[in-house]
Image (cartoon, helix red, strand yellow):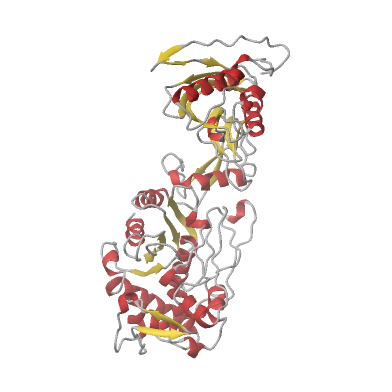
Amino acid sequence: MNGAGKGAVVVGVFLAMVGGTALGVYTLVDGAGSGEGAGASAASAKGSGPVTGEEAARTAKAFLAAWAAGRDREAARLTNNAAAAQAALAGYRDRAHIAKAVFTPGAPEGAAVPFTVAAEVAHEGAAKPLAYASKLTVVRGETTGKPLVDWQPSVVHPELGRGEELRAGPPAAPPVKAVDRRGEELDPHRYPSLRPVLDQLRRTYGGKAGGRPGVELWIEPASPEAPRRTLLTLAEGEPAKLETTLDARVQAAAEKAVARYPEASVVAIQPSTGHVLAVANHRKDGFNAAMEGARAPGSTMKIVTAAMLMDRGAAAADQPAQCTKEVSWGGRPFHNLRGFELPGADFATAFARSCNTSFIKRIKTVDDDGALAEEAREVFGIGLDWKTGVRSVDGSVPEATGAAAAAAYIGQGRITMNPLNVASITATARTGVFRQPVLVAPGLDGRPLARAERTMKPAVARQLVQMMRLTAASGTAAQTMAGVRGSDKGAKTGSAEVDGAGSPDSWFTAFSGDVAAAAMVEAGGHGGDAAGPIVAAVLNR
């Protein structure tokens, strides 16, 4: 835009009267200089107290006129962060390649002035129009008292956050056409919560799967780990086809299910293969909590605890289990939900009704601080550095003693999981064999898969499935699972207390046939309150 062969175009200012305030239309020019202009004086007057609407309009007018004329230094001096503003405005032309921009301010809303942008993005012979609305706010300078634009990246574009910038050009990775297990395209517009997953697939496999990059305008994130966000495609690339293990039908059900609850996440896995069938999130921050979260899983952890206890001979499904209202361990009291007790219950019933005290009472019988961590790692594959094909976080089950060990037995304390981890735990319980979850076949890039040290003992696997079936039939999951189709189904509920939260996290995991799913809703209440209906909807897909 600033090449020597391009002549400067005089900026046109078209004035209109709105509510007694002169507003204008300002056109970004090619080849404009960076010298000072008359606009700087428009906001030079000192003042005190709140910024008035007249001051806001006058400052916005001067700022937009300077920006439009390519006088970056002058425009930046009309903000309260001149260095950041000047770099961003220069990047608007030089790195985002935005030209022919027309800035049209609207009527001031107090100290805020909305404006619209109609521009063109041009790079390497490709060009497309760009239109959006933004807003700036005028504040009083702390030392000068002058009205100044409160500099935020969103002034340049409303989707820009701190440390982010606009860029245009060929993307680092060619586009990919991700398809499900049956060859159906996984369109992010149809499956919006897959967007971060699809972005990762593109970055990881775009070059490996073939394809040719196009030309795009995107938001460059502040962190290299965060995905780029494409705003405009100037020239289509040639996408490479990438096969995933996802199932479009299950994914559609998962998307619809999580949309009912804020801060909800779910993962579905095929137990016989470890294939990830669906990943869905409904979150304001766009975080893939389903695969990258790390929160206490509550009583869903009792699947692993029960397996460990039966593995060590400290429990059996038909053996008596003392389910008292409360128990103390390590100097800390633990109780059941609403203080219930189950006189004369066996261990299967204690599991189905999620009796905390029955599990904690068995710590002394096991007499091994590392037993739970060992079972989680050696049988369920937790913490073995899963390479799923996209970024994921392994569950963590550290060794614990005293009250921390009691908390760990019921999925609290320092234990952390996400729905991917818990769905895998359920899949392992269903088959007795850990199969590392994968979303992309390892053959594409030769990555190794984690393998558990040992399979579950057949007697333990049989009893564990029996207890999960009992939970689904007459335990804490009965109401939720009653609507799940099929006769072969099992479940486990969970709720995890989080410091400072008014309500516990809701956890629910279940299997039906050859599908296992787990969901978590932050501050969603008890297991069946929010996470349960999500899992049920996915299983009924």
Q: Nearer the viewer, residue 149 or 228?
A: 149
Q: Which quadrant of the view contains residue 146?
A: top right
Side of 422 relative to 491 (left or right): right
Q: Position of residue 384 (x, y in %)?
A: 60, 67
Count of number-bearing discs: 0
Q: In this view of the protein, can residue 170 be seen by the observer?
A: no
Side of 24 relative to 11 (left or right): left
Q: Nearer the viewer, residue 95 or 443?
A: 95
The residue drawn where x is 46% and y is 51% is 246
Against 280, residue 146 (above or below) is: above
Against 227, residue 390 (above or below) is: below
The residue drawn where x is 44% and y is 57% is 267
Side of 482 relative to 149 (left or right): left
Q: Which quadrant of the view contains residue 46?
A: top right
Q: Position of residue 257 (x, y in %)?
A: 35, 52
Against 469, residue 267 (above or below) is: above
Q: Position of residue 116 (x, y in %)?
A: 47, 23
Q: Quadrant of the C terminus?
A: bottom left
Q: Position of residue 484 (x, y in %)?
A: 29, 62
Identity of the residue furthest to the front in this view = 48
Against 265, residue 93 (above or below) is: above
The residue drawn where x is 53% and y is 23% is 59
Identity of the residue furthest to the right in this view = 4
Q: Which quadrant of the view contains residue 264?
A: bottom left
The residue drawn where x is 59% and y is 59% is 387
